[in-house]
Amino acid sequence: MKKSNVTTEHKSKNGIDSTDNGLMRKNISNLDLMKLMGYGWNLGNQMEQSNYSGKMTTIEQCETSAGNPEATQKTFDGLKSYGVNTVRIPVAWSNFMSQDGKYTINKELFDRVETIVNYALNDEMYVIINIHWDGGWWGMFGAEEYDAKETPIRDEAWKKYISIWTQISERFKEYSDHLIFEGANEEISGRLNDNYKDPNTAQQNQTGKLGKKDPETEKIDATEIYEMANAINQKFVDIVRASGGNNAYRHLLIPGTGNESCVIEGNESETYVQNGTIDDRWKLPNDPAEKATGVKKMSVSVHYYDPVDYGLSATSTASYGYRDKWGVDYTDANGKTYKGQDDYDFMDNMLGKLKKFTDQGYGIILGECGVVKGYKDNIPDFMTYLFTQSKKLGMTPVWWDEGHYYNRGDGYFAYDDVGQVYAKLTGSKPNIPASAELVYTGIKTVPAEKNENPKVVATWNGEFLRHTNGDTAEILKKERPDSFDANNNGIGVTKSLIDGSGNVTDGDVAKSNYDKIFGKWWEKTEFWTPDTHYGWTNSTTGVNGEAPDNLIAEIDREYWNVHLNYDWSKLEKPCIRVTAADDPISQSLDLQIGYLSSWTEDDLNEEVQGKLKLEEYIEKQTSKDPNFTMTEQEKQDMIAKEGAKQVKKNKKKGAVVGKTTGEIRFDVDYDQGVGLFWKGKSITIDKSKLTGGYPWLWVTTNTYTGASIVKIEICDAAYNADGTKFVESDNQ
């Protein structure tokens, strides 16, 4: 049972570097597997970043579109040093797939996913891959309509699902039992009735026909949803087992069902009522592997973010409530009291319901669990108890992370107290770089300048619109008829950008400067194009009346960001100040600040690409043999050979400019209900990271309705507002 899956490095049948030896231990049951899988982590917001718009042209763009760097071996080596032994890699396969009815997955996407899988396998981790939302096409299963070719929409859904899993099964069937397939994410539930016509709004619209209305309650009986979920899960098992090879015995993860996720216990929605995965209407598939081996080879997948007002809610305006503490006695701002023991009892009760499956010999994987926002209190306590109780009950917990908790580029948990939970539970000693910038959950402050009244050199005022309701949409249509589009998922509308002297930008000049300077960068490195941006403005005068183009503010609807590019060398001590308008929506801003490197044409530079490959090779060899060395001639030969090879690949992918890298530094709420962490503060900017680059400020409402109005000021904290030199004694 403890035999290693690692052997000498070789090429997989698909030409991917691998150390996996293909060992399939046929007689390991899922309950035994849970003991080996330990504690897990999700590579969230990376390979599942959806390209339903079709505007991203490269896999790299998809992988990095949420601000996460490309995954490397270092990403997984760092996780392993904390004792993480299972990694879930969510995947959106439709991003690069033929639309000819065959649904052929792009080879480069397959290669990239397989490469990342092998990063984890090299560390002897267990790896889960799935179909993850994938553009929201799942609503096709609930449709009874026909497409333009008079083909039943539901039939097309089956065709696509079968094609995807047939391809995945064939691609990975040589791999060991350290690789696990998961049939879906959170889609086999009420999302089967999502709006299949517009994936962009799928989670807000119900157009499917599954379920019958109860004339007495006016609610939808979810029996048909359960029946469809069961049919999909059975098809998943049938496809994988029929593919042969190691897939005949591979461990399979069967997605549960719930209101909008694979929850343990469901809840009532406006559309239907159901009881989640524990409902007797949800059935595990028949599995020929169990008959062949005498042991169960399927596990049940559920997600755990309970209580949702703690685990999922980001702001006090969330429809399902908000709380920032867990497991302690306290009274919130509204006078509601909480008993800490109730939280522990609730978790025990919920996890205990899953005993229904473990008693039958099925494993349980909490494929996603945790607290989405790391600035809340008591997260280490929540995490420790959840992980400990899960293991006691024979389950494997897999923490959800969108790039929030773990620094994927440098290989350490930026939220150090979360990383230390893994280390303590596993007895591991993490490799934390000396340069690591560690933060902690429950953070109540952000790095603020002592100069409370710094010199303002530029000001940006703007509106951010996300998931508008009808009333808000009508108002904004009247106010911004030239810019507002109610059909877009998110829109930013710039009101003005002015310099320190109060000079308002000329719109024509702004557009010209955008096209000339910043537009080219976006067009070439990201999937956004100029027509997806709103409210472009550019300062025509800048600091001390110097030449234009030294300040650019940009907003985009896709991720409702503000990007600020400035000549930071002119500032001794740069900082920014964010002020939200005095209304509930604006005051619930979820703010992040990070740094984005400048773009170059390095993707087509053989020397640069060769050196990158050399660094990767040396790092990999050194990890195996600390005494590994290369001669200078060997290094130069590798640079030339590998550089030419990589540039050829990049050209084939359509590369024009180099990749960008980013780092999210702070992530804390502005919300009145959780401390106003940002209010009235000038936030220090790390000038060393701005040399030749772009600081990236990310502002989002997270309220899913209405517009947030904010003011962003770029300041120089070395000077007072009147221009005099600031010294600390000024503020004493």
Image (tube, grey):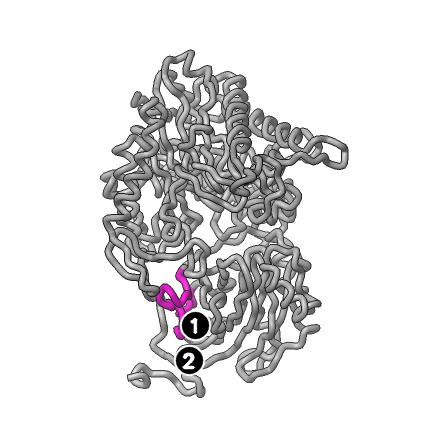
Residue 532, horizontal then vertical, whole percent = 65, 58
Picture residue at 48% right of the left edge, 46% below the top: 45
Amino acid marked by disc 1: Cys
Disc 2: which residue: 454
**416 left or right of 402 in image:** left
Disc 1: which residue: 575
Name the outermost residue toward the front. Answer: 216
Which SS class for mark 1? strand
State the quadrant of the N terminus: top left
Amino acid marked by disc 2: Pro
Say if the magenta span includes residue 669.
yes
Q: Nearer the viewer, residue 265 or 656?
A: 265
Q: Which residues are magenta?
A: 668-688
Dividing the picture into quadrants, the one containing residue 338 is: bottom left
- Mark 2–mark 1 Cα distance, whole angstroms, equals 9 Å
Residue 421 in sight in this render: yes
